[in-house]
Image (cartoon, rainbow, N blue to C red):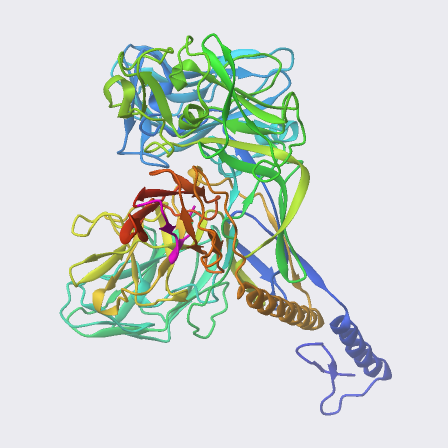
Amino acid sequence: MSSDKTKRLGLNKWVGSDQVLRAEFNENFDKIDAYVDDSLAVKTTSVRLKQGLQVIDVNQSSPLNNVTIQGRTLVNLLGRAGGFEAGDIVQWEKGSATLTSDTSTFVAGKSSGKMTTTEAKVCFIAQQFTYKKGKYYILIAETKNGTATAGVRIGNNDARSTWNTDATKWTTQFVKVNYEKDDREDYVIFNCSGAAGQTGYIDNYRVYEITRAEYEAIDSMTLEQIAAKWPYVDDMKSVYSPYIVKYGENLLPPFTEWTRVTAGSKATPTDPYKITFLANGDGDFAAHHFRCVPNTTYILKVDSLDNMYHGISKMNWNEAIVSYTTETSFTFNSGNNTELAYVVKAKDKSKIGSLTNPTLCLGVEAKSFKPCNDDYLFFPNVNLASTIDGTVYDTLFQRDGKYWKQTRFKSMDLDGSLPWDFDYNFTGYKRVFIPINSAKMPLPTELGGPFVGACIKYDGKILMNSSGIDQTDQAYFTTNGGPYFKIYISNADSGWGDLYKRPLEDEVRAYFYGWVMYDANNYPQPYNGSGTKAWGYRDPYGAGGLAGGTSTPPNFPAPGFTPYKLKYQLATPIVEEVAPEGGITLREGLNQVEVGTGMIVREKANQKITGNSYAIINSNDPAYPTGSALKHRTKKILTVYSNERKDGKWNIDDSIDAIGKQRAWIFYSNYDPSAAYTVTYLALDQYALTSSIQSIQAECAGNIKSVVDTLAVGQSDMAARVGALEITRAQRAQPQWIKPTLLNGWVNYGDGAYTDAGYFKDEFGIVHIRGLVKNGQLNASIFMLPLGYRPARAMVIPVATDGNGQLILGRLTIDFNGSVYHTLGGTGWFSLDGISFLAER
């Protein structure tokens, strides 16, 4: 009888005088046979990822495969008013209270709402709101008491949260609301109660329509779960630019990327993973903040610790999770924390000290040192929408080694670049329309009455979705004479007076660029059909609420204007290929994985130079020239690229001068003025960009055979993609010139010796223009470039032109709205040759 077993398969081992039994001998063969069967079987393991940081345990190292993401749209029925940013507070009614924006304390954005009572009673701010019969709603906000005796609360006149008296932190409060019998004309309310002059704070107020199942499940959810499921968004947002990051086995970066290393401590990274504290420093510590999964066990190990302490603390650096120790390894539990700090310092500051190769891993088993090596999978600019109840949704999926998006919803800006026209005049408001066509507006599922989707006004208000009655702030699709999409606009918003019966096309388009019409002879009164027309943009600090007066209808966006937005369900879904960046391999055992949205990938940088010292990106430091901002405020800058390659010479740090949280800078000696720099970063203001992901479904291989099969299929798919790219590149070598429609009397020179006007966009996004034209109108458009072929800003370009039979220098302007127009020079002939620029609009 065997007295020992093998480690892996548990096979019987006989030693010494052990008797060999036939049953044990056959048992070994059965185990080997079963192992072979298991190894040859095709096994996959389902992986479900949720928004945020999590731990995934797999039994076999394998690529993450068959990733599927469902779209989700959140429509905040308060629009943008619940953000309490500057300009939002005027939308709230006040009862025995004042309301101001407070920039000293907030949850998101740049400010919160500060309510101050003016009487000793239950005071309020409120928004009128209609609760529809048979619908289910949840009201959520972050609140903080100021000095109010009774505290603060949210709700309506029938349902209210408890009073929050905590003035030390922000607290999530919620109320669920349902009316079964009739519509309820009521309010969305924030109360503050106490003596006159007492205060309370509110931020991120949102109202969502939810399903009955969600309504019934709320009572079993924690506040954290409610806040995560229904985060605050401005007006209407869908999943935008989702990403997955699998962090390296070692969760610590090199010392050059640590959060805190002070000069006074004399701490110096002497190698990527070695830090040295020189003698006679001030005794201060170095630290790195790392994200962690709550209530999870981690192990910290270093290869050497010479005259050094190290430990784990909370983010204030004062509350120890693991007190300073000289042990080379220790385990700890993260508790209820989502972020902790690893801290190191000299044991005896009068002597030199060093620490090498710190390794932070999940679990209790110490791992040999490896540099941090993260995997990522980004889906830049992908937008995934859904219906409010989530039953119909866009889907991102993987097939044949490629990623695809099945689009069921169309999301678009309704700005002045679209062919708007006037439709009908009513007392106090007017109706305008836009034709539906397959290019810009594919057909919706409904062409009469309410449609599946939503239309958002420039101020964040949700327009009524119906065609049953005529009233302002309403939108709908119709087949009557169309198909068309129609919007009702109040005269107070547009500046078109009741007596001005028919605004012109350019005037309607100017409205959708954010401009308000007025009577220049009776400023700022609406234009009523006589006098002088003028336009200004909304400015709360301008005289009469307007600024930037002009006498012609502007064909460009007003400063700071947010256009109308439309999302609707398509009659026919569209499947299109998606270009991701990166790939993920899960290693055997525990993996720390993050899922999120709002990852901005390889955005063109606007780096600025100060003297010959530094180049900087995303900073408002007064020592640098202005204009280095990225498009969105940054939460975390991941990478700076130079000519599409990662440039490790850039330093990324937290700074009070950053626009957001982080900036990037480089010594001028390492800067290449001729390089094209791009940046990948995580946007800070998620509420203004995206909703959250509910879940991601994926698979990984469950055994060696499945891993090999996955890699073999991946190799085949890669070969197919490379072959297709080679063919496409060869085809792109022969540009397909597009012949534009010439305008305002301009024609091609046309004698056969010269090239006709044309344009094309190459594989790098560069638009090229050529041709020789003549006989057109001075200072007028020659032709229009479509969306996708336009510069970000207007360009002034010198060209060759005719000047009474002589060659002279002329000027061509290419506007951001696509207009290519003559601004200086003759019309006998006008050259368009040699023009090229980056398409950014």
Side of 16 relative to 508 (left or right): right
Magenta part of the chain: 826-841
> What secondary structure do most residues of the magenta stretch adopt?
loop
Q: Is residue 509 visible?
A: yes
Numbered circles on residues, count:
0
Which sits in the foreground, 386 or 51?
Answer: 386
Percent across and percent down for residue 285 are: 24, 61
Give the answer, above or below, for where 839 lies relative to 257: above
Give the answer, above or below, for where 197 lies relative to 238: above
Side of 177 relative to 165 (left or right): right
- The verdict on residue 735 being magenta is no
Which sits in the foreground, 469 or 618?
Answer: 469
Side of 506 relative to 813 (left or right): right
Percent across and percent down for residue 332 are: 43, 59
Query: Which residue shows up at 63% across the image and 32% down it?
Result: 389
Q: Residue furthest front?
A: 805
Query: Which residue shows up at 26% across the image and 34% down it?
Result: 104
